[in-house]
Structures are given as C-alpha cells and as structure tokens.
Image (tube, grey):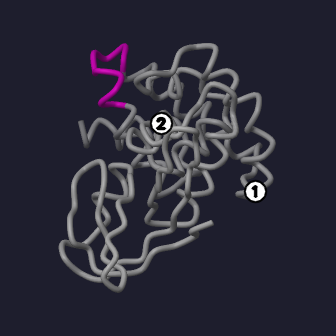
Amino acid sequence: MITQIKGKLVEKNPTYVVVDCSGVGYLLHISLNTYSALPANENVLLYSHLSIREDAHTLYGFISKTEREVFRLLTSVSGVGPSTARTMLSSMTSEEIQQAIASENVKLIQSVKGIGAKTAQRVIVDLKDKILKTFDIDEVSVNQNNTNKEEALSALEVLGFVRKQADKVLTNILKEDPSTNVETLIKQALKNL
C-alpha cells in the first residue's frame, strides 16, 4: 500500500495533482481543501490512499493524516464510495465532518451533493462511535455547541438572514471559541453578516 508520496508538484488542478517522485509522476485525486492548502510548484508531502477496484487503481492524496482517516471512515460506510467521500471532503473540512457526525447533523451531511437522507443517516449510525473514539471528541460539548448554534441560527433566520450564510459565520465564531453562548453568538454573527 502506498501510504505517502513526497516529491515535486508538477501539475495542480482542483480535482487532482501530479507529483514527480524521482522521475515517476503520480496522479493523486484530491479534495478542494487539499487543493487550497497546497503550494504552487514546491516539494510536497501528501498522505495517500490506494483504492483498488476491478477496473481501476486510483490514488487519493490528502494534506493531513486526519483528512485521510476521515476519508477512510467515510468509504467504510455502505453506499459511500471514494468519489462521494472526496466530494464530502471538498464541501466541508475534516473537522466539520467530524462535528456533523458527532452531533448527528443529518441536514449538514445531506447538504453534500449526491448524499440523500438514508445515506446521511447511515453515515451517522455507522461512524458516530468511531468518530468520537478515534478523534477523542467530547459528546457533551458537541451537543451543547450544536444546541447553541441551532438556536442562534434560528434567531438569525427570523431576522431575515440566509441560513447558509449565517451557518458559515456561526461556524467560524465557534472555531475561535467553542464555549460561546447563544446571545454572544448572535451578536458576533450580526457584526459579520
């Protein structure tokens, strides 16, 4: 199994990169998060996962071990293939996926193109315990943050703000201080919207 590739970045596209490793060019499929974190033409180290099917051997590249681990967990769920997992990692960061699964946020997972309600629920059922254990996430704080965020989101919607825009702003605020209460969340969000 090819676990990592280190070499010169020869070609960089939003969906794939080519890394020259001692004269051999490896094509790695990547997420948009990995794409935005990569430098232009420098030496890079990508953690990889080799997907083997009857008709193809596909190499996937990740900027971090955490992103690769989330990818592997996602592909272990029935109905979620490598391309769907990559789409999820392009739509959300690894941390957002972990939080969505840990807090059982079906709507957020379902917002990813190609994922229906049943698949979103299956992802949560299959991976919640693994995510909590593997990444050592405290379930109580996840539920508390999720409740505060949902209340703040509802309030902002009532005030006429677009849910998706408000959600992004609230997520950024909670990244800085996960213990922010509802009132402070709303006040800070109003400043940023």
Q: Which residues are magenta?
A: 157-166
Distance between the alpha carbons at the discs numbered 2 and 1: 32 Å
Residue shown at the point (50%, 27%) measured from the top left: 108
Front-most of 53 and 48? Answer: 53
Where in the figure is residue 99, as x and y percent of width and height? 60, 43
Q: Secondary structure at mark 1?
A: helix
What residue would you read off at disc 1? 134
Residue 177 higher or lower than 141, as above or below = below
| Residue in the image at 48% along x and 36% along y | 183
Helix, strand or loop status at disc 2: helix
Q: Nearer the viewer, residue 193 or 93?
A: 93
Quarter of image, res 50: bottom right
Q: Which residue lies at the image location 57% right of the left edge and 68% below the top edge?
A: 2
For the residue pair 16 and 92, the one nearer the viewer reads as: 16
Q: Which residue, given by chain and number where applicable, does mark 2 sit on?
A: 183
Q: Label the magenta part by its dominant secondary structure.
A: helix
Q: Is residue 145 above or below residue 120?
A: below
Residue at position x 46%, y 37% in the image? 83
- Left-right relation of 12 to 115: left
Residue 75 spot, x, y in % from top left: 62, 40
Q: Quadrant of the N terminus?
A: bottom right
| Residue 159 falls within the magenta-colored stretch | yes
Amino acid type at mark 1: Thr
What is the crowding at mark 1: few (fewer than 14 residues within 10 Å), some, or many (at least 20)? few
With respect to residue 18, does 147 lie above or below?
above
Q: Amino acid at mark 2?
A: Glu
